Amino acid sequence: MKVKVLVTPKAAVLDPQGAAVRDAMQHLGMPEVESVRIGKYLEIEVGAGSADVESRLHGLCRDLLSNPVIEDYEIQPTNL
Amino acid sequence: MGAVNSLAGLKAEYVWHQEDSLSEYDAIILPGGFSYGDYLRCGAIARFSPIMSAVIKEAAAGKLVIGICNGFQILCEAGLLPGALVRNRSLRFVCEMVTVRVEVAASAFTRGCATGSLLRIPVAHGEGCYFADEETLRDLNGHQQVILRYADAHGKIVSSANPNGSVENIAGICNREGNVFGLMPHPDRACDTRLGSGDGATIFRSMAETLETLRAAAA
């Protein structure tokens, strides 16, 4: 099965990449863009029949895929 | 490694990341570099190297651990130091000589300095912007854990002296117990005046003095 994970910078963390992209969008015809935040999107293929996928995935989201000090994560609802 | 070996009385050795013991060493240095290509986040994968369980064990036992640049990032990812290092505010890799002010001289890593003294040490990083939330910052400041801050040539903590956007100009912090220290500048690249500065040697000499003191106390 496919699992999708979104990792985004916390609101309090500076996102200079997002700010640079926001500026570019404003210059390229969308002055109404107010903010851009850049995160990561992971597509993870998991073999069928694995046990406790969701809880183990949450564990690895906290330990490896995101850093809870600076990022939030979200496991997108699929057919988990 | 060469930097440490160039200092009288000190001897450094490389330890392979697949090894799992550091018990024979007096102190541990996590050097700079781009472990695992900084994939995912800087230090995120390196912190799961087999050797890191030994680093965590020795740190908990009170051994001196210093993380330089990527080593600092790894120590934060491993939870041995609070906060995290993120992309430089300028989005540029910075490679230059900076000035840092010693905020706490009563540390295992800066005892050879006076509080307020200035060290010239180079930085070379793309993700050296130190971040910690307000509560963590209060804790760090309240417990004398901010050891180094970026300063101008007069020792003033100003944003123009901050090479990466680090919160409160923080360049180096230690843990509450004081035996784990992380910094973005490279003291290892400032151990010989012929390379522009010998100030970095003060950090390693301070560590050696601390070890001597500990040995004398144990004897």
Image (cartoon, rainbow, N blue to C red):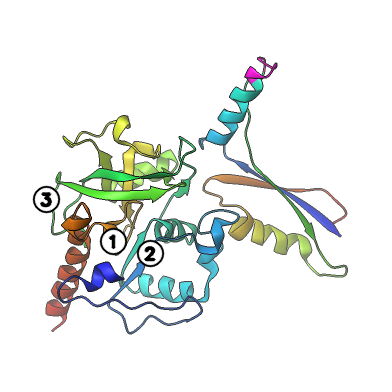
| Nearest to N terminus: mark 3 or mark 1 | 3
Callout 3: few (<14), some (14-19), or many (20+) C-alpha neighbours within 10 Å? Answer: some
Which amino acid type corresponds to the residue marked 2 in the rendered image? Pro
Q: Chain of mark 1?
A: B
Which amino acid type corresponds to the residue marked 1 in the rendered image? Asp
Q: Chain of mark 2?
A: B
Describe residue B19's horizontal placement relative to residue B216 as left or right: right
Q: Badges 1 and 2: C-beta atoms under 8 Å apart?
A: yes
Q: Residue B79 location, x and y as percent?
A: 46, 59
- Residue denoted by label 3: B114
Q: Badges 3 and 1: C-beta atoms under 8 Å apart?
A: no
- Which residue is pictured at 22% across the width and 35% down the height? B152
Q: Which residues are magenta?
A: A26-32
Residue A10 appears in which quarter of the rendering? top right
Q: Secondary structure at mark 3?
A: loop
Q: Residue B41 location, x and y as percent?
A: 56, 53
Rendered-image quadrant of the N terminus of chain B: bottom left
Q: Which numbered disc, 3 or 2, marks the residue closer to the eye?
A: 2
Q: CA distance from mark 1 to mark 2?
A: 9 Å
Q: Residue B219 location, x and y as percent?
A: 13, 84
- Residue denoted by label 2: B31
- Which residue is pictured at 34% across the width and 46% down the height? B139
Question: With respect to residue B86, does B190 lie above or below?
Answer: below
Callout 1: few (<14), some (14-19), or many (20+) C-alpha neighbours within 10 Å? Answer: many
- Residue denoted by label 1: B188
Which amino acid type corresponds to the residue marked 3 in the rendered image? Ala
Q: Secondary structure at mark 1?
A: helix
| Nearest to N terminus: mark 3 or mark 2 | 2
- Which residue is pictured at 31% across the width and 80% down the height? B25
